Amino acid sequence: MKTENNHFAKAEMLIRKPVSEVFQAFTDPEITRKFWFTKGSGKLEQDTTTEWTWEMYGFSLTVTTHVLQENHKIVIEWGNPDETTLVEWIFSPLNEHETFVSITNSGLKGDADKIIDQVRNSTEGFTLVLAGAKAYLEHNIQLNLVLDRFPKGLA
């Protein structure tokens, strides 16, 4: 019998910027919108809720921030009310100019097929988010990875 220990998705990436800049990119919607969602109702703050919107998909969701440890860790809860999951960012400075970011999405529920689908989608999504953040923070390039993942006109 499998344990729930494998009911999570993970994506990781080195971003060649100081930890303070990388951390801010995931807490300040004015920066995050350059590589992930299109609009955030405010900066992430511990024990508060924020709304994130992907205007290109006509989709919004409420994010509850449970942990916000500056330059170290963010933990949010998000999803449909009956199917919320936790997303945890760990920011590990390798030196003053490099940060290793690890994102884990846990608390996935359902039968094996549903969990596999959630792990695949979450891993792909957070990999695109990290790649977009890397391109934007290191090179000031907006790759539009999240926008272009599901282009209009594609069935």
Image (cartoon, rainbow, N blue to C red):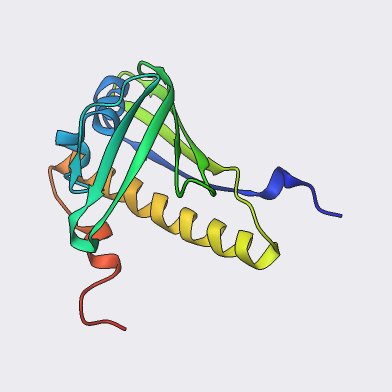
Please say if 83 is above or below 49. below
Q: Is residue 37 left or right of residue 82?
A: left
| Residue sitting at the far top | 70
| Residue sitting at the far right | 1
Residue 13 lies, in percent from the top left, at: 41, 42
Please say if 136 is above or below 146. above
**Total numbered badges shown on the rendered structure:** 0
| Residue sitting at the far front | 81
Looking at the rendered image, the quarter that the N terminus falls into is: bottom right
Residue 95 lies, in percent from the top left, at: 37, 20
Give me the residue at 32% from left, 23% from top: 19
Residue 73 lies, in percent from the top left, at: 44, 23
Residue 110 lies, in percent from the top left, at: 66, 58
Looking at the rendered image, the quarter that the C terminus falls into is: bottom left
Give me the residue at 15% from left, 51% from top: 142
Q: Is residue 103 left or right of residue 145?
A: right
Give me the residue at 27% from left, 58% from top: 146
Give me the residue at 28% from left, 20% from top: 20
